[in-house]
Image (tube, rainbow, N blue to C red):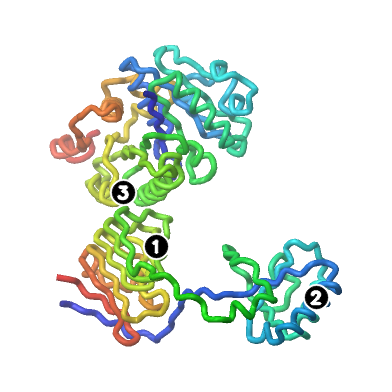
């Protein structure tokens, strides 16, 4: 077995999703703030340590209104991390740009928070692996965060497969494979023929230019050894 | 039963319109009723390929918007009375295509014809999606080069997810047509070989059409190559592909590099 270890500084990037509360104020603000204060009196500390996104898309606001509202909320200890629905240039540099494609998660009523604080029922068992019997075509992205991903066909150039666990590809890997996406250094990538654009495990990645020529077109597995992504031909 | 075929590719300039006209004419020559539909609204070309550009009065958009009846917009070919054209509009754009309107026109066409061959615009946007939407069968035209192959791969993914058949849990029949095949450039490894293309796309092969002067001459004449010069290599490739579309088993021949033989005899310069 030929194994090639690259020593590179452990620069890592991870994809991770977080839950943020979205506050959508109503006009006029004075009334809305009174209501908010009343709610806060009932459950003080609700906003402590919680990231909040302010949704102003439904309101037609001028720049000073937004600044005023932000100040009012900050005075109540509401930690705003991003604002939706206003000109980005109105906001200070401290706020994060909000990526598109957020998923709404329902309205949360402050009054019902007591009940929600009780431990949630155990989630039903999720399947620990996903099998695809179709090739993954260019432009397609398969994301399976809960476990191993097995693909019987090819992964095309310009396609992307992401798994929380290991990735097994029985065809040729020409696109990107990202294993251990949720922070699993034990994940591995296997493919029957390596032509990959990018391989990543637990945030450590390598592009095709950093993959030795003699491994191209070979059946290969990739894993992590410390802070190095190791590739080796499989017998 | 009518068969709706979409001729698609993702990338532009690979030979979709030429293939639509040539396959359509080849099928019509066997006596089946064929309608070729130009979905390239705003950049129509199929009328030119069929030499019908001066006969366009009403078009697909007029029919979709209810300003003309389907029968008014259909143009029957002068050489083959089993071949009809539904032209695109040149003065509009793809936004004029509506989902409902296209569905209605395709339903009407199914009642009239054995084969409806839709010439898709390039790209992966609205026009291309609506052209493939109602298809039973797809002919994916690709050139043996990596950009074309990757775009075709993208389109195949969309055929498997955005068509009516795919959405209802069914399968769309897919065929690969390799066009502009240049054996000498493939021999010099300037282009991908057939095996490489088939391996990447994993779709069964419908035919291999050689790069040919005849195809260019035919489109300048306003006649599909299968009508203007049915014995040339490209026309024969299209005729074989049309027979395979109807389910006939026809042996596949890979176009040879004709220059090789002469090259060996005369030292490379003969054509």
Residue B55: which quarter of the image? Answer: top right
- Between the C-alphas of marks 1 and 3, the distance is 16 Å
Q: Nearer the viewer, residue B215 or A159?
A: A159
Which quadrant is the C terminus of chain A positioned in?
bottom left
Q: Nearer the viewer, residue B248 or B195?
A: B248
Image point (28%, 56%), residue name: A153
Q: How many marks?
A: 3
Residue at mark 1 = A160
- Left or right of B67 on screen, residue A177: left
Query: Which numbered disc, 2 or 1, marks the residue that appears first in the sequence?
Result: 2
Above or below, A12 against A66 in this view is: below
Residue A218: which quarter of the image? Answer: bottom left
User: Is the residue marked by circle 3 packed among few (<14), some (14-19), or many (20+) residues within 10 Å?
Assistant: many
Return the chain for callout 3. B
> Residue A182: x percent and y percent?
42, 76
Residue at mark 2 = A35
Foreground: disc 2 or disc 1: 2
Image point (42%, 35%), residue name: B135
Which quadrant is the N terminus of chain A positioned in?
bottom left
User: Is the residue marked by circle 1 packed among few (<14), some (14-19), or many (20+) residues within 10 Å?
Assistant: many
Residue A129: which quarter of the image? Answer: bottom left
**Contact (CB < 8 A) between labels 1 and 3?**
no
- Between the C-alphas of marks 2 and 1, the distance is 47 Å
Residue B65 in view of the camera? yes
Residue at mark 3 = B201
Which structural element holds mark 1? strand
Residue B233 in view of the camera? no
């Amino acid at each position: 077995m030929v194994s090639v270890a690259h020593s590179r500084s452990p620069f890592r990037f991870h994809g991770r999703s977080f839950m943020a509360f979205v506050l959508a104020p109503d006009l006029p603000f004075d009334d809305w703030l009174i209501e908010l204060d009343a709610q806060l009196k009932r459950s003080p500390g609700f906003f402590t340590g919680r990231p909040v996104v302010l949704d102003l898309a439904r309101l037609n606001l001028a720049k000073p209104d937004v600044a005023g509202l932000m100040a009012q909320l900050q005075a109540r200890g509401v930690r705003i991390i991003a604002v939706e629905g206003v000109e980005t240039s109105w906001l200070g540099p401290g706020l994060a740009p909000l990526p598109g494609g957020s998923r709404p998660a329902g309205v949360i009523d402050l009054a019902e928070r007591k009940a929600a604080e009780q431990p949630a029922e155990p989630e039903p068992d999720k399947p620990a692996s996903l099998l695809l019997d179709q090739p993954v075509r260019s432009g397609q992205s398969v994301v399976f965060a809960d476990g191993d991903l097995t693909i019987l066909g090819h992964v095309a150039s310009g396609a992307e497969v992401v798994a929380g666990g290991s990735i097994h590809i029985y065809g040729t890997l020409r696109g990107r494979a990202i294993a251990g996406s949720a922070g699993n250094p034990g994940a591995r990538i296997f493919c029957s023929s390596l032509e990959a654009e990018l391989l990543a495990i637990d945030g450590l990645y390598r592009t095709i230019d950093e993959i030795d020529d003699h491994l191209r077109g070979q059946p290969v597995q990739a894993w992590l050894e410390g802070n190095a992504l190791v590739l080796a031909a499989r017998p | 039963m009518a068969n709706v075929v979409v001729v698609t590719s993702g990338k532009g300039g690979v030979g979709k319109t030429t293939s639509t006209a040539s396959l359509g004419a080849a099928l019509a020559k066997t006596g089946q009723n064929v309608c070729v539909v130009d979905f390239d609204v705003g950049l129509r070309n199929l009328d030119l390929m069929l030499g019908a550009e001066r006969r366009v009065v009403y078009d697909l958009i007029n029919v979709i918007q209810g300003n003309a009846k389907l029968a008014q917009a259909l143009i029957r070919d002068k050489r083959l009375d089993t071949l009809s054209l539904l032209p695109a509009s040149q003065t509009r754009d793809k936004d004029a295509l509506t989902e409902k309107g296209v569905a209605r026109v395709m339903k009407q066409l199914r009642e009239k014809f054995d084969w409806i061959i839709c010439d898709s615009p390039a790209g992966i946007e609205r026009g291309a999606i609506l052209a493939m939407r109602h298809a039973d069968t797809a002919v994916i035209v690709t050139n043996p080069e990596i950009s074309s192959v990757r775009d075709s791969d993208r389109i195949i993914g969309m055929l498997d997810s955005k068509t009516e058949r795919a959405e209802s849990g069914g399968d769309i029949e897919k065929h690969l047509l390799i066009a502009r095949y240049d054996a000498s450039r493939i021999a010099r490894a300037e282009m991908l070989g057939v095996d490489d293309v088939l391996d990447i796309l994993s779709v069964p092969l419908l035919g291999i059409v050689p790069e040919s002067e005849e195809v260019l001459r035919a489109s300048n004449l306003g006649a599909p190559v299968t009508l203007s010069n049915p014995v040339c290599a490209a026309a024969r490739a299209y005729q074989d592909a049309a027979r395979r579309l109807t389910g006939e088993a026809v042996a596949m021949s890979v176009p040879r590099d004709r220059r090789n033989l002469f090259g060996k005899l005369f030292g490379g310069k003969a054509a």
